[in-house]
C-alpha cells in the first residue's frame, strides 16, 4: 500500500512498485485514516507511508496505529527531507525503513527486496543522520526527548485536533491525553499552543504556514 497526499509523487512511486514482479497489487490512498481502513479490509504486507501527511491523521500516527493493528506489517516511511523527524524513535517502534521520495526505481526495488526479506532499509541520508546521532551526545531536536505517545499527542495537537478527538484516534481517555500533552510541553519548554506550533515548524514536524 502507498500512502501519500501528493498525487504526482504517489503516481510516480506507484508506477515503480507496480513494475516489480514481486508486487501483486498496490493500494493507494492520500489519507492516513483510510490507510487504517484498507489494512482492516485487505491483507496488506508492506506500506510506504508519507511521514508528513498534511491533513487528518499524520504519517507517524498512522504508522504506529497500523503496527498496533498488525504487528508484523512492514512499514517504510517516505520522506522529502534528510532531516525529517525522529527516524531512530520510529525504527525502534517497528518501522522497517526510510526512503526518499526522490529515490530512483532501482532504489525502490532494493528497499522492497530488503524489507520483504526481514531487513531494514535506510536511504543514505537517513543512515548518515542516525550514524551521526549515535556518536554524538547532542540532542538534534527537542522532540527527540518525547516518548512515542507524547509525540503522537503533540503531532495531533499542532494539526488542530481537540483532546476529545485525539483520545478517540489513539484509544486513550481525555485525561490521559492531557497528561501526555502536559509532559510533552514541559520537556519542550513551551507553555502555549502558538509556541508549540512554531517549534514544530522549526523542526520540520509540520509545514510552515
Image (cartoon, helix red, strand yellow):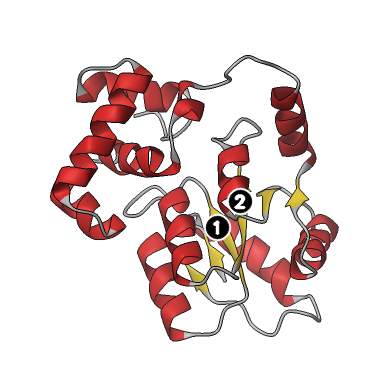
* Front one among 206 and 151: 151
Answer with left or right where residue 74 lies relative to residue 177. Answer: right
Q: Is residue 123 above or below residue 39?
A: above
Q: Nearer the viewer, residue 174 or 63?
A: 174
Quadrant of res 154: top left
**Image quadrant where residue 187 sits:** top left
CB under 8 Å between discs 2 and 1: yes
Q: In the figure, 7 relative to 15: above or below? A: above
Look at 22% across and 36% down and name the residue there: 179
Residue 40 shows up from this direction = yes
Q: Is residue 25 above or below residue 118?
A: below
Q: Secondary structure at mark 2?
A: strand
Q: Position of residue 122 (x, y in %)?
A: 75, 47
Question: Residue tagged by mark 1?
Answer: 49
- Quadrant containing the N terminus is bottom right
Decide: few, some or many residues near mark 1? Use Cα within 10 Å; few <14, some 14-19, many ≥20: many
Which residue appears at 81% of the width and 64% of the height?
109
The residue shown at (61%, 54%) is: 95
Mark 1: secondary structure: strand
Label at residue 186: none
The image quadrant where one finds the C terminus is top left
Q: Within 10 Å of the Cα at label 2, are there few (<14), some (14-19), or many (20+) other Cα atoms?
A: many
Left or right: where 49 falls relative to 130: left
Q: x, y percentage for residue 5?
A: 46, 56
Residue on which disc 2 sits: 78
Q: Please tell me whether residue 17 is drawn above or below residue 208 in the rendered image.
A: below
Amino acid at each position: 500500500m502507498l500512502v501519500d497526499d501528493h498525487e504526482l509523487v504517489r503516481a510516480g512511486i506507484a508506477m515503480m512498485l507496480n513494475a516489480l514482479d514481486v508486487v501483486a497489487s498496490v493500494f493507494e490512498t492520500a489519507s492516513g485514516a483510510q490507510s487504517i481502513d484498507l489494512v482492516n479490509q485487505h491483507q496488506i504486507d508492506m506500506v510506504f507511508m508519507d511521514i508528513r501527511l498534511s491533513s487528518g491523521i499524520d504519517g507517524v500516527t498512522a504508522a504506529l496505529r497500523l503496527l498496533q493493528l498488525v504487528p508484523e506489517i512492514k512499514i517504510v516511511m517516505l520522506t522529502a527531507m534528510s532531516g525529517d523527524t525522529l527516524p531512530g524513535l520510529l525504527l525502534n517502534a517497528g518501522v522497517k525503513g526510510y526512503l526518499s521520495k526522490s529515490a530512483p526505481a532501482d532504489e525502490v526495488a532494493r528497499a522492497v527486496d530488503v524489507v520483504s526479506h526481514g531487513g531494514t532499509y535506510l536511504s543514505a541520508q537517513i543512515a548518515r543522520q542516525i550514524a551521526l546521532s549515535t556518536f554524538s551526545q547532542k540532542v538534534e531536536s527537542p522532540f527527540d526527548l518525547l516518548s512515542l505517545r507524547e509525540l503522537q499527542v503533540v503531532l495531533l495537537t499542532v494539526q488542530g485536533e481537540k483532546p476529545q478527538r485525539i483520545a478517540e484516534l489513539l484509544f486513550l481517555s481525555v485525561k490521559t491525553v492531557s497528561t501526555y500533552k502536559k509532559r510533552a510541553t514541559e520537556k519542550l519548554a513551551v507553555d502555549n499552543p502558538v509556541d508549540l506550533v512554531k517549534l514544530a515548524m522549526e523542526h520540520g514536524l509540520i509545514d510552515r504556514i
